[in-house]
Image: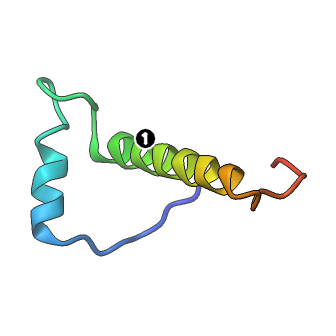
Amino acid sequence: MPKISVEVPQELLEDLDRHVGEDGKFVNRSEAIRASVRKTLDLLDEIDARHDRLDDVEE
C-alpha cells in the first residue's frame, strides 16, 4: 500500500485522535483517515451523479 504524507492542523489532529484507540471508532489514525477519504469520495460521487458529471467508466 503506498504511503503519503500530509500536513494536518493541530486542532484537526486532536479531533481525529478522539476517535482513535480502545475507546474510539478506529484502531489507528491511518484507519480513520482511510475511512474519511472513502466516505468523502463517495459523497462527491453522489453529488457528481446528481449533476450528471460522472464518467461512464467506473474504476
Q: Which residue lies furthest to the front in this view?
A: 51
Q: Which residue lies furthest to the top in this view?
A: 23
Disc 1 target residue: 35
Type of amino acid under label 1: Ala
Question: Residue sitting at 17 percent across and 32 percent down?
Answer: 21
Image spot of residue 7 (x, y percent): 29, 75
Label tally: 1
Q: In this view, does 51 lie above or below 38?
A: below
Image spot of residue 47 (x, y percent): 59, 53
Q: Is residue 16 visible?
A: yes
Q: Is residue 1 visible?
A: no
Question: Residue sitting at 14 percent across and 46 percent down?
Answer: 17
Q: Is residue 21 above or below residue 47?
A: above
Q: In this view, does 1 lie to the left or right of 54?
A: left
Q: In this view, does 28 lie to the left or right of 11?
A: right
Instruction: Report crowding for label 1: few under 14, some 14 to 19, many 20 or more residues within 10 A (C-alpha).
Output: few
Badge 1 element? helix
Q: Which of 12 and 48 is in front in this view?
A: 48
Tell me, what colour scheme is on the image? Answer: rainbow
Q: In this view, does 50 lie to the left or right of 34?
A: right
Q: Residue furthest right?
A: 56
Question: Residue sitting at 40 percent across and 47 percent down?
Answer: 36
Question: Residue sitting at 17 percent across and 59 percent down?
Answer: 13
Image spot of residue 3 (x, y percent): 50, 61
Q: Nearer the viewer, residue 10 or 58?
A: 58
Image spot of residue 41 (x, y percent): 55, 52
Q: In this view, does 4 lie to the left or right of 23?
A: right
